[in-house]
Amino acid sequence: MSKYEVVSTNRVAGGGTYQRIKHESTSTKTPMIFGLFLPSTHATKQVTETTPALFWLSGLTCDDTNFAMKAGPAAFAAAEEQCIALVLPDTSPRGEGVPNEDSYDMGIGAGFYVDATEEPYAANYKMYTYVTEELPKLVEESFEVGTVKSISGHSMGGHGAMTIAFKNPTAWASVSAFSPICNPTQVPWGEKAFKAYLGSVDAGKAHDATELLKGLQSSCFDDILIDQGKDDNFLANQLKPENLTAVGGPQKVTVNMRSGYDHSYYFVSAYIKDHVAFHGARLNKAQGKLRASRSSYDFSSTTGKPIKCKAMVARGPKQPLTEEEITVDAPKAGEVRVKVIANALCHTDIYTLDGYDPEGLFPCILGHEAGCVVESVGPGVLSVQPGDHVIPCYTPQCSQTSCIFCMSPKTNLCPEIRSTQGQGVMPDGTVRLHDKDGKDIFHFMGCSTMSEYTVLAEISCAKISKEMALSKACLFGCGVSTGLGAVWNTCKVEADSTVAVFGLGAVGLAVIQGAKMAGASKIIAVDLNPDKFEMAKKLGATDCVNSSPDKIDKPIQKVIAGDMTPWGVDYSFDCTGNVKVMRAALECAHRGWGESCVIGVAASGHEIATRPFQLVTGRVWKGTAFGGFKSRRDVPQLVERHLKGELPIDHFITHSFEGVNKTNDAIHALHSGDCLRAVVRY
Ligand code: NAD
Ligand code: AHE
Ligand code: ZN
């Protein structure tokens, strides 16, 4: 592991951090400084993975600070959104004893991303090796960044990005460039550099994008994105993108000629968001493929046998969970035993642990928002097999033609195993979970994922793509899906609707995200905790109201229906579980047609009330379980939408922990008020 020193660290507006890092380079034999942007998701990523990275190669005279200060704000915000890192190497070796020329286009600041063979440059000017080998190794090993990487750059860096990508197409997921030197062997900058560094212009052909493109037999990338300013002084005699496009051939190259832009960072900062998004989509796809290829488990030693493993057992209401070694039986007919890879805490787990759930049974193993791998299947199970990635679903889907619920488009409430599920047992009335003394432990919501292994009914398993990290996909097991589905399925919120959301936990924020995606024009976010408002606005809230009694001078429903809207909102959602809030949500719904949806789960014995007049005057009160999603059909589609970049959810993961025995810490985090979802990875 190479040594390095963090020279500076700055938090970045919009999330993430930017560091400057110094290290002794084995390639250039000099100290080198590079920049590293890490998105906020880096802290909660799966430990077995690295954060995908875009390498940015700067142009002549620049170092990492030019990009960071001029294009950084736009680039960092885009990288934060794409959950990717940015790596910004310097443009050459620098410092005492490094050969240099008294001109901006040779020597220091002008390394041209080649390995010089000629004196006096051969000793230090090894920028090709530095960028293609040394730096990727350093950031991967020391910063868990860039197993999957892409490359881009400006001017000389554009030349470097394209040549490096053409020479190692399998090492880079995508390539793009700003104002690149496309045919350096044909222009003064390239001729001068190649003669000095490589001894001849001809030797430069191996580092000339146009020449390399001519040699490509097949397409290496789905597309290459190039942006070029039409008012760029260097366009005619140094950059020559027309030479590159003239090659034609199998490789698609998109060159955008932009009016009103020159060779400066004004140009880069204007379009850097597009390039980061371009790479983000391809990096996340490549990361998904890598993840899927690495997801291999050998369960041959456990199949058919009981498994001993660690679990967090709820021994009684309001007691901390106890870490215990339990035995998980082999799956019976129609059952699936899974290895739980990650489990997220939902408020309903707390609600049951606190003794508010009329169906609560102890001892039990809670947990119902998880990502799992199938370990073995019982007799007759055909829909999943060992190694498959599944999301446990507390609202199962039997899909039998005899099931009027599964056959109806109106509901997702398949009752096939609901009664046994509510009694904490498997469909045959027995349990698969036992403590060290062999005593039965109740299942919970047909899931019980606060255990390293658990057993599910086959109809409760939604099989998903292996390309999505299970430590993220787990969120589709409950809160996030419920919020999105309440908007899209239960209420079918139309474009231009007005919406009010009460409670801005993961569920409420998912309602806001869903309403925004549905085109709602006004989204009122209500919570007692104003710390939740920043994320609510980021996801689409247009108004935020702190409904604490000392913050408003009238009932919240009158603030919303009266002050903020003339007749109330088209749709309102309770995501608190508080029956008074459920009433307020109904009573701020629009006279004549407003619909109010109960998502929150109320404590046993708590009932809702309102004056019938509220309904007589056209308001509708409804509720939703799991957002109305038919679990085994719809959860895989939510995962696909996320993989396509259409449904970002990383922002819900505010806390992450390693090891099932950290579940009590996660529960503590959920109580802290600044937690949306705490993911515990096993
Ligand atoms: P959470 O605890 O993370 O969020 C609840 C939010 O409500 C918090 O921000 C809290 O400050 C706010 N809040 C509490 N009391 C309030 C009040 N009186 N006025 C305004 N805001 C208030 O919970 P979560 O995980 O987002 O779940 C929300 C609710 O949805 C819970 O009741 C949970 O059990 C339920 N839930 C239901 C389903 C379903 O299928 N119906 C699925 C998941 C969760
Ligand atoms: N056990 C409680 C019911 C709790 C409840 O309403 N659960 C929701 C899911 S909450 C997920 O975090 C649900 O899906 N309900 C439908 C169902 O069939 O349970 C009680 O009141 O008995
Ligand atoms: Zn839940």
Image (tube, grey):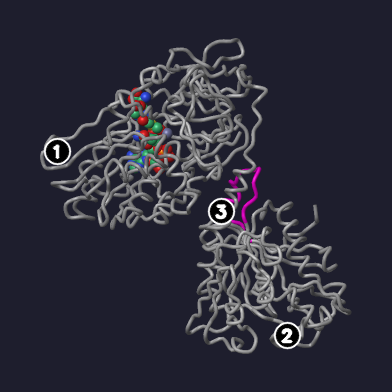
Give the residue drawn at x 61%, y 72%.
67
Q: CA distance from mark 1 to mark 2?
A: 76 Å
Q: Is residue 102 left or right of residue 40?
A: right
The amino acid beneath tag 3 is Asn
Residue 190 point in image, percent of width and height: 72, 83
Q: CA distance from mark 3 to mark 2?
A: 37 Å
Task: Return the residue at label 3.
Answer: 284
- Quadrant location of ligand 1? top left
Mark seen at residue 615: 1
- Image quadrant holding the C terminus, namely top right
* Magenta highlight on residue 40: yes
284 lies above or below 267 = above
- Callout 2: SS: loop
285 lies above or below 153 = above
The amino acid beneath tag 1 is Leu
Question: Nearer the N terminus, badge 1 or badge 2?
Answer: 2
Residue 381 point in image, percent of width and height: 49, 24
Q: Is residue 232 left or right of residue 624?
A: right
Magenta residues span 37-52
Task: Return the residue at label 2.
Answer: 104
Residue 349 point in image, percent of width and height: 45, 29
